[in-house]
Amino acid sequence: MKLVYGIFLLFAVHRCPAQIFDTIRASFHSKPKFLFQIDTYNSFVSKEPANTFGIRTGLEFNRRVRLSIGYYNLTSDIVKQKFISGVFANDTTLNARLDMNYFPVGFEYIFYNKDPWEISMPLSIGAGKSFFWYFLNSAGDKGRIDQKTVLLMTLAGGAQYKILKWFGIGAGLGFRIMLVDNSSINENFNSVIYSLNLRIFPDEIFRLLFHKK
């Protein structure tokens, strides 16, 4: 499956018109604009619905190119029974929740950007951890099991419509590929990703509040 996606990416890059590369190159000569966005997307983990929440910050060039870094975290309740040894007085089996958090570095090319519409293709590669966590005590302290480093890639096509300058709706469709997976966890994180949500742009709110007239 990874080979198929790799061939797809190579083909896409090979067929990409030279004009796009010229636009990207020219965009980096423009003055950048600060970017901060709240982001969410839906996916599947071993056929179970899984939601991911994230924030990202970076720079936008010429309303055509965005470079960003962020933090994303799996938010869905995917619970499995895990055998816990050497933690409590007696070995036991507990309900543990699957989690994954990662820090992506992103590149986004904006094909069309004329208010109120925007059409783009974001690509990101992120590194983080996947693991199961469980409660250690009634105070809410948590323990982790099966934690290992992961490396993943997401690629999607998306569109958004700004209802107001700082508020809009967005939709996207793409895929998530685990480049380095957690061998201690059986769940499959390779998945189609999709989104249909409200979008708030905190950077635009900041500009509206503090823009010098």
Image: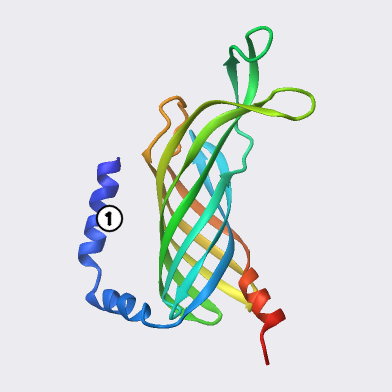
The residue located at (26%, 53%) in the rendering is: 8
Q: Position of residue 166 (x, y in %)?
A: 65, 74
Q: Position of residue 72 (x, y in %)?
A: 55, 49
- Dividing the picture into quarters, in which one does residue 28 lie? bottom left
Above or below: residue 53 compared with residue 17:
above
- Dividing the picture into quarters, in which one does residue 84 lie? top right
Depth check, front residue: 42 or 141 = 141
- Quarter holding the C terminus is bottom right
Q: Residue furthest right?
A: 139
- Within-10-Å neighbours for mark 1: few <14, some 14–19, many 20+: few
- Dividing the picture into quarters, in which one does residue 138 lie? top right
Above or below: residue 58 compared with residue 26:
above
* Type of amino acid at the residue the image marks with label 1: Leu
Q: Residue furthest bottom?
A: 213
The residue located at (67%, 75%) in the rendering is: 206
The residue located at (30%, 77%) in the rendering is: 25
Q: Is residue 11 left or right of residue 122?
A: left
The residue located at (49%, 74%) in the rendering is: 118
Above or below: residue 189 compared with residue 154:
above
Q: Does residue 164 appear anywhere in the picture?
A: no
Q: Position of residue 21 (x, y in %)?
A: 27, 74
Q: Position of residue 81 (x, y in %)?
A: 60, 19
Q: Does residue 45 appear anywhere in the picture?
A: yes
Q: Is residue 7 left or right of residue 40?
A: left
Per the image, the residue denoted by label 1 is: 9
